[in-house]
Amino acid sequence: MAGIPKPKLNAGQRKSQRGTEEAPFVKWLLITVALLFSLVFLLLPLVNVFAQAFAKGFTVYWDALKHPDTIAAMKLTLLVTVICMPLNVLFGLAAAWAITKFEFRGKSLLVTLIDLPFSVSPVVAGLMFVVLFGLQGYFGEWLADREIRIIFAVPGIVLATLFVTFPFVARELIPIMQAAGSDQEQSALTLGANGWQTFWYVTLPSVKMGLLYGTILCIARCVGEFGAVSVVSGHITGKTDTVPLHVEKLYNEYQGAAAFAVASILALGALLTLGLKTWLEWREAKLETLAQQAEQAITQ
Amino acid sequence: MSIELKNITKQFGGVSAVNDVSFTVADGQLVALLGPSGCGKTTVLRMISGLEMPTAGEILVRGKRVNDVPVQKRNIGFVFQGYALFKSMSVADNIAFGLLIKKWAKADRDARVAELIELLGLKDLAKRFPHQLSGGQRQRVALARALAPKPDVLLLDEPFAAVDAKIRQELREMLVNLHHELNVTTIFVTHDQEEAMEVSNRIVVFDKGRLAQIGTPREVYEEPASEFVARFIGVMNVLDCEVREGVARCGELEFPTHGVADGQRLRIGFRPYAVQVSNDLMAYRHFAVLRHTYFLGVLLRLELEFPSGLIIRARMSKEEYARLNLTEGRKISLQIRQYRVLAREGELLPPEVSVTHHLGPSPGDGI
């Protein structure tokens, strides 16, 4: 507008700064430190994995991947994931449901127990299963008599992975379900729905993002778990080696390029997971903004 | 459908939320459960719905005991205080949910949803999601959803608490019209006595988990069964009086009493409309000064102060006020046409407003 003279700003006004904001140099210092740190300790090693994998050419890379032992490790990892993921989803849903919808004695104990795998070192977790099911373990003799092998066999690997990935889905769902309360479920009941219908039509749709997110994290850990699995696996090449164990073995056998080749598959999986998670978050944020805009449009 | 509660008691962890409550709701009535927060009214509603089980007593529907009938089988429509719409479903899907569960055919379902959308004026909103609706719209969707499966009883928990005053008024009228049209037995919970008076044809007043009174709005207002009801419904002047020579006295005011011994204390109550005011100082025997006039629309509320400092409230129409040529600070004469003894010594409760006869604001000053 031509008629209104522009107010002249002095230097201090022009670079107006909020009272709550840090001084600019502090801000930039913190950002630089954070960026440098993630560059050196996160991005560089990751790039290095791929660089090393292809260091001796694509043929070596491809040979390492199609080696029968690598294929066997991948199959085992896949099998473990396919068993553990649904079980943990089921458990996570059940635990979150119990904790958020019911009042019962020992509830806080259950919450603490769910967190246990997070606080126990994976190696200790693996050892727990050895102490229980190993030959010298509590149930060792009983199992040996019936020729059931758990330790140094696939069941042990599944158990160890199950233990380590236990909290992911439940931890993701509990806060969401707590925030949602039980009003929607109650109104489903008043409309005649039984427990299963209520769960299927009302509860599940309202937690589906959290469930998906928890499941992704759970899968990532199933695939990547090393410590606990290492203790119970027995490292029988082609039989009880998962992908991470196989990578270590190759590396220890001075097959660096092969080790990094297999590792690159894990890294790729991790990147995909991260990408998927970011995309889901972005999508939810977008839906949220849309909803807010719609709300504003209504109130105006 | 008639509903009867017989000696219903509900305890939560040893604490009684509802205590020995009995009342009957006749078929087709529109009943308000009224009381201050924490009086057990919502618990009573939830017990009727089957969401809560009574600790003792019986709930009868059409004369049949339903204590052990689960909520799904009671064929009730329930509107929650926070609406509790299904967030992941559109308005139409929300309304259709009960029909889907009851396995209505698709064509019937669609027809019924269309009917309710029409009835509740949700026409352009059918495809929207709950977070895209305003408070009043959400409330209407919640009502439509509850009504869709043709419930025998409609139960509403504080249905209008979460919307602003203007929308609340519209929704009240809508509920009355809906009830008139559908004639479904309706019970709603409210802490707002004005809302209860306006909407319902019977009011059940609760006080601390007990039934305080049940009656038509007029009965509850004009014939309160206790001091609690008298104070809770509408505005009431409440005076602490001492009986001397057979007359209860408080400041300049005197109320003849029968059969009360001298020296006893009484609590006397009278409604603002029972105070008759004149600008002719010879007209009545009491004098007071018009301290303040509150403009409430068609009605005015007057604050009158006696020479002793006693303050009472009166009420009159705008026309009457103009006719009497009243202004603030003017001296008037007055008399009290009707009053009632609220409590006698021994049953006196501590006054709820303030100790002397200065009356603080009380709920529903509009009445």
Image (cartoon, coloured by chain):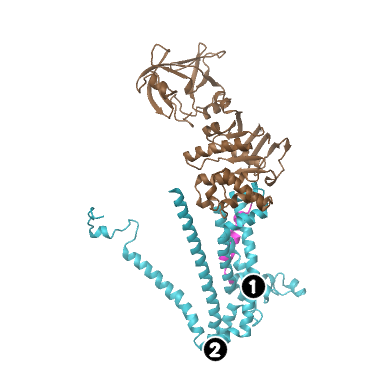
Q: Residue at x 52, y 40 (%)?
A: B161
The reply to whether discs 1 and 2 touch (Cβ–Cβ < 8 Å) is no
Q: How far, Cα to Cα, is label 1 from label 2?
A: 29 Å
Instruction: Indicate the colour of chain B.
Output: brown
Colour of chain A, in one word, is cyan
- Rendered view: B299 above or below A189: above
Residue A189: image location, x then y, percent = 65, 48
Circle 1: element type: helix
Task: Name the chain letter of the residue that bears numbered label 2.
Answer: A
Amino acid type, callout 1: Val
Along the line of sight, which residue is nearer the eye, B218 or A110? B218
Percent x, y for residue B331?
Answer: 36, 18
Bounds of the magenta span?
Answer: A105-122
Q: Say above or below: A132 vs B124.
A: below
Q: Quadrant of residue A96?
A: bottom right
Label 1: few (<14), some (14–19) or many (≥20) C-alpha neighbours in 10 Å: many
In the picture, measured across the screen, residue B358 lies left or right of residue B189, that is left
- Mark 2 lies on a secondary structure that is helix
Give the main secondary structure of the magenta stretch.
helix
The quarter of the picture where the N terminus of chain B appears is top right
In this rendering, position of residue A60 left or right of residue A140: left
| Residue at 55% over, 83% down | A259
Which residue is identified by label 2? Answer: A59
- Give the chain letter at badge 1: A
Residue A261 percent across, percent down from the top left:
54, 83
Magenta-drawn stretch contains A49 = no
Which amino acid is tagged 2? Thr
Q: Nearer the viewer, residue B327 or A47?
A: B327
**Residue toward you, B242 or B230:** B230
Tell me if residue B208 can be seen: no
Query: Between disc 1 and disc 2, whose residue precedes?
Result: 2
Picture disc at residue A80 = 1
